[in-house]
Image (tube, grey):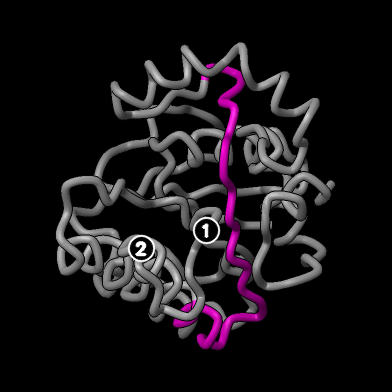
Amino acid sequence: MKVLLFGATGMVGQGVLRECLLDRDVTEVVCVGRRPSGETDPKLRDLVLPDPGQLSSVEAEVSGFDACFFCLGVSSVGMSEADYKRVTYDLTLGAARTLARLNPQMTFVYVTGAGTDSTERGPSMWARVKGATENALMRLPFKAAYMFRPGMIQPLHGVRSKTALYRWAYVIANPLFGLVRLWAPDRVTTSEQVGRAMLVAAKRGAPSPLVEMADINALR
């Protein structure tokens, strides 16, 4: 299986990249982003672009892939809805439309978040924009498209958030993950499980296009 990975330097993307490199079924991983992934492996290649949403100049390099794991995203904190939509909706759909045209056999897996608003009319700005992005992606002519909606993710195996505030938050919260897993197992997952679940969805599918926390933990 040949995989395209967007957002490999983010916390979720780091975990997904690790699982892709460990998976025997994955023969090639191309990481698309504004900077290199920082990892080295015989089956890994970086494709550095100033705008990962614009793939017109590299169509030959993003053709012939079986799966795309789209983990690229930003926090909405401090952003206007218009700016957040440009980074979240416009960039994602710009890349996805090109990939759907070039790779009709592709399974596209998009990381959104728990609480995403599929109606696109709720009070939460980020949830509306994510919901609109999900809905648009599911209308594209991919072989299959899955919207992963993780909530609390425990980073494992050296995975770290790029945001300093989030890194401190995870340090503080780390002792609580075990308790949350004990009392509310469907409220927490790990970076390892998210990566493995995305690979399972790409290989064998998932029960629903909207993959909630319980589904992520059940995909093995």
The part of the chain drawn in magenta is 135-158
Q: Is residue 97 above or below residue 124?
A: below
| Mark 1, other Cα within 10 Å: few <14 / some 14–19 / many ≥20 | some
The residue beneath circle 2 is 124
- Looking at the image, can residue 87 be seen? yes
Image-quadrant location for residue 180: top right
On residue 173, the disc is none
Which quadrant of the rendered structure holds the N terminus?
Answer: bottom right
Along the horizontal axis of the image, is 23 left or right of 41?
right
The structure residue drawn at horizontal position 64% and vertical position 78%, both measured from the top left corner, is 105
Q: Is residue 105 above or below residue 11?
A: below
The structure residue drawn at horizontal position 67% and vertical position 57%, both measured from the top left corner, is 212
Image-quadrant location for residue 162: top left
Determine the residue located farthest toward the front in the rendered image.
123
Across and down, in percent, residue 215 comes to 76, 55
Residues tagged 1 and 2 counted as in contact (Cβ below 8 A):
yes
Q: Earlier in the sequence, mark 1 or mark 2?
A: 1
Q: Is residue 138 magenta?
A: yes
The residue beneath circle 1 is 115
Q: Amino acid at mark 2?
A: Ser
